[in-house]
Structures are given as structure tokens and as C-alpha cells.
Amino acid sequence: MTEKLDMLNWVVFFDPDKKQCDKEEAGKWILQFYNSEFGDKICQKAVDEGIVAQAKHSNAESGVCCFYVECDDTAAHKRCIQFFLDNDLIRKTKTGRLYNISYKLDEQTRNNEYGADFKAEIKLADFIDLETREWKI
């Protein structure tokens, strides 16, 4: 059963019966949203469906959704990416190519790696072809 916590800056959804990400291996796929109701719906859906054990979104009308998986768990990455594809969550270019979204380690967040200082170690293109959407792994 999914639980919801309304915090100052975040709205967090988690399954208390599932193992949460290991602190050293934790990271998140980040997507933008422009409607807090949508952020609530998609984060809760990801946890309800067992895609991730934890998801959160900015406690604002627009912001980011974060979907947590351990960096070395390929099956979890694939499950999360497939969820994004199934729910049309990844932005596309004018030609229909998927944007090469990034996965961010929590350690990078703790080290204040943002903007030009942020270098993603894992990106969507590591898993799928951005044009054809065929899996590489």
C-alpha cells in the first residue's frame, strides 16, 4: 500500500513494505511536470504498480518528479524507463526523437552538482535508441 508524505518542499510516495534504495547506490530519474495533480498521480501510480519503491515530486504547481532506483540495478532502470514510455512521460523533439534524459545519483545531489557542474553517468541512450525506442540492453 502506497503511503504519501506532504513535506515542505516535496510530496513523497513510498511503499513501506518494499526495500528502499541503498543510500550509497541511490539515484533518480527526473522528469518535469507542469501540474501538481499530475505529479501526484504519476508518482503514486509508479509506486502502486511496483515500478519503484519511492517517488516524489516538488511541492509546487510545477517542478520535477523523481523516481528512485539503485544505480547498478539494470532491471529497475528498464522497468522505470518502460513506465515512462508506456505513460508518454519523456519529452520528444519536433522529429519525435526522445530527449536523452539523465539519471542522477543522490551523491551528486548531496555534492550540489547542478547545471553546468552536473555530468550524468547514466542517460536514457544507455538503455534505448532515442529514435526507434528499441532496447540496447
Image: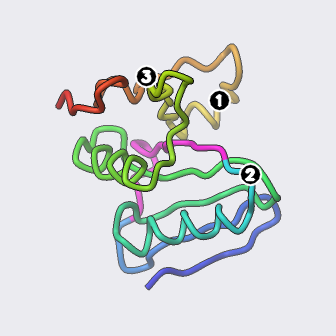
Q: Depth-wise, is mark 2 or mark 1 nearer the camera?
A: 2
Q: Which mark is residue 34?
A: 2
Magenta segment: 20-32
Helix, strand, or loop for circle 3? Answer: loop
Total marks placed? 3
Q: Label 2, label 1: how many angstroms apart (C-alpha)?
A: 27 Å
Q: Which amino acid does the dot numbered 1 rest on?
A: Asn
Tell me residue 29's x, y (percent).
49, 42
Of pointers 2 and 1, the one earlier in the residue sequence: 2
Q: Depth-wise, is mark 1 or mark 3 nearer the camera?
A: 3
User: Contact (CB < 8 A) between labels 1 and 3?
Assistant: no
Asked if the stretch drawn in magenta spans residue 30, the answer is yes
Of pointers 1 and 3, the one earlier in the residue sequence: 1
Tell me residue 127's x, y (percent).
28, 30
Residue that numbered label 3 is attached to = 121
Q: Residue at x 78, y 61 (%)?
A: 59
Q: Is residue 128 left or right of residue 89?
A: left
Asked if 125 appears above or below 36 in the picture, the reply is above
Q: Quadrant of the C terminus?
A: top left
Q: Which amino acid does the dot numbered 2 rest on?
A: Tyr
Q: Single out the residue that lies furthest toward the front.
A: 95
Tell me residue 89's x, y (percent).
51, 47
- Binning the other alpha carbons within 10 Å of mark 3 as few (below 14), some (14 to 19) or many (20 upward) gives few
Closer to the camera, 125 or 1?
125
